[in-house]
Amino acid sequence: MSAPASSTPNANTELVQRSLASVWHPCTQMKHHEQFPLVPIASASGVWLTDAEGKRYLDAVSSWWVNLFGHCNPRINAAIKDQLDSLEHAMLAGFTHAPAVELAERLSRLTGLGHVFFASDGASAVEIALKMSFHYWRNLGLNGKTRFVSLQSSYHGETLGALSVTDVAVFRDAYAPLLNNNVLVPSPTFDGKGDGDYPCCLECADAAADVLQTLLEERHDEIAAFIVEPLVQGAAGMRMYHPQYLRRARELCTEFNVHLIADEIMTGFGRTGTMFAWEQVSTSADMRPDFMCLSKGITGGYLPLSCVLTTDTVYRAFYDDHTARGFLHSHSYTGSALACRAALATLDIFESDNVIVANRAKTRRFSALMTPLRQHPRVSNYRQLGVIWAFDVSTSLADFAKRIFAAGLARGVLLRPIGNTIYFMPPYVTDDGEFLLLVRQTLAAIDEVLA
Ligand SMILES: *Cc1c(COP(=O)(O)O)cnc(C)c1O
């Protein structure tokens, strides 16, 4: 903040050149930056990112789905600054500290899952859940349970284990020879056929659950766990589905001795309208997932932190005199005190501002503002769940997503379509005026790109 921000007209260009020369950017074919802009951000506040020349962009994707309460939120900033002067980080093997303990206790109370294993990123949480599940069965003498089941179009992260349960071709295809042999089952999302209703097609849920049932009946001996993104397949294009699928999946997993892993890395912390998406499936104790993965919004979008929550049953199967029956996994920054404090400050905001309830009224108002987009002649499959809005645009432009990104930037909004799907996943602090601006600028961007 205190660095002298250069405001010369070419401040942006200079930083971009240096970045392209030295930073290998994520999820990017670097050559595309010959044509499409790389945006240097100098500062941020609330829903706005500001570049070196002072141009502002409304962060409609919450900086890759992580931000909840705005950039440079004064309450989270204060908590991190306070923590910084007492303890920044200490290893969590053999040691503990108040922020990790308090966060584990609060997350346990919120989810009903009493044991919390910390890591740093979403993908590392997925790795941990997969390894824990396999190791649990092994500790019970069931060594044949070596496979995992996931949904078609699922996304669980991009390290090799997480990628092996991910079904998004652009991320997966190049590495397919390196990936474990897992099993895909049909997704319960509406496939556009029949007379289903996009967000919540009950028939689609039941048909997909029937396939899962047949698979588990036949192959449960070799299956450790079923991993799923509850209610929304995010990276597949915000594909939403009926909670009935998850009720049946939970019952089937219990019946056939297979773990259910709820990957709430994107859906957690209020995104789907409840604190965790699983609350819309069931709130009863015997319907809980065996594992829940959390990350992204956990620190309000500030610092890398993730965790896996699990049950007493799983925990007890590792508790033993033999070291090798324990869960020996580790990451250097496990339970970072600074990140845990950011997470505690985030939970404090949820409580003191009654965020889940406040978001309900807000999302109703925002959904009404979506009407002109919904009614646009080229828009179809409009859907909304909690603080996520998405729709598909019919176009044959192969680079539609990149063009909308560029057209959005020119109009001061950060949009990052997934294929032909445009979605809004703004921070919860977005106000009505900002959302209206987002809708108007998106309409203009669509009309410009399709013209
Ligand atoms: C983003 C995401 C991940 C991976 O998290 P990273 O922090 O990017 O590794 C895993 N699962 C889901 C559902 C996600 O949305």
Image (cartoon, rainbow, N blue to C red):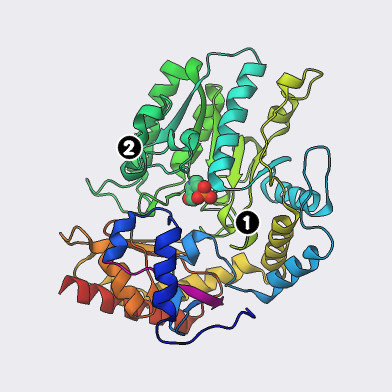
Q: Is mark 1 within 8 Å of ligand 1?
A: no
The residue that label 1 is drawn on is 298
Residue 222 forms part of the magenta stretch: no
Please indicate whether residue 176 sits to the left or right of residue 79 in the image: left
As rendered, which of 143 and 162 lies closer to the eye?
162
Q: Which residue is mark 2?
A: 174
Q: Secondary structure at mark 1?
A: helix
- The quarter holding residue 367 reads bottom left
Spatial distance from mark 1 to mark 2, Cα to Cα?
31 Å
Q: Report the magenta residues as a range.
A: 35-46
Residue 143, numbered circle: none
The amino acid type found where label 1 is placed reads Ile
Residue 249, percent across and down?
Answer: 48, 34
Q: Earlier in the sequence, mark 1 or mark 2?
A: 2
Is 36 contained in the magenta span?
A: yes
In the rendered image, the vertical position of residue 403 relative to residue 318, given as above or below: below
Residue 85 appears in the rendering: yes
Residue 108 versus residue 36 in the image, above or below: above
Q: Quadrant of the C terminus?
A: bottom left
Residue 28 or 302: which is nearer the viewer? 28
Q: How many marks?
A: 2
> Looking at numbered disc 2 in the image, what kind of residue is underneath it?
Ala
For residue 379, above or below residue 362: above
Q: Residue at position x 61%, y 79% from top?
A: 3
Neighbourhood count class around disc 1 (C-alpha, 10 Å): few under 14, some 14–19, many 20 upward: many
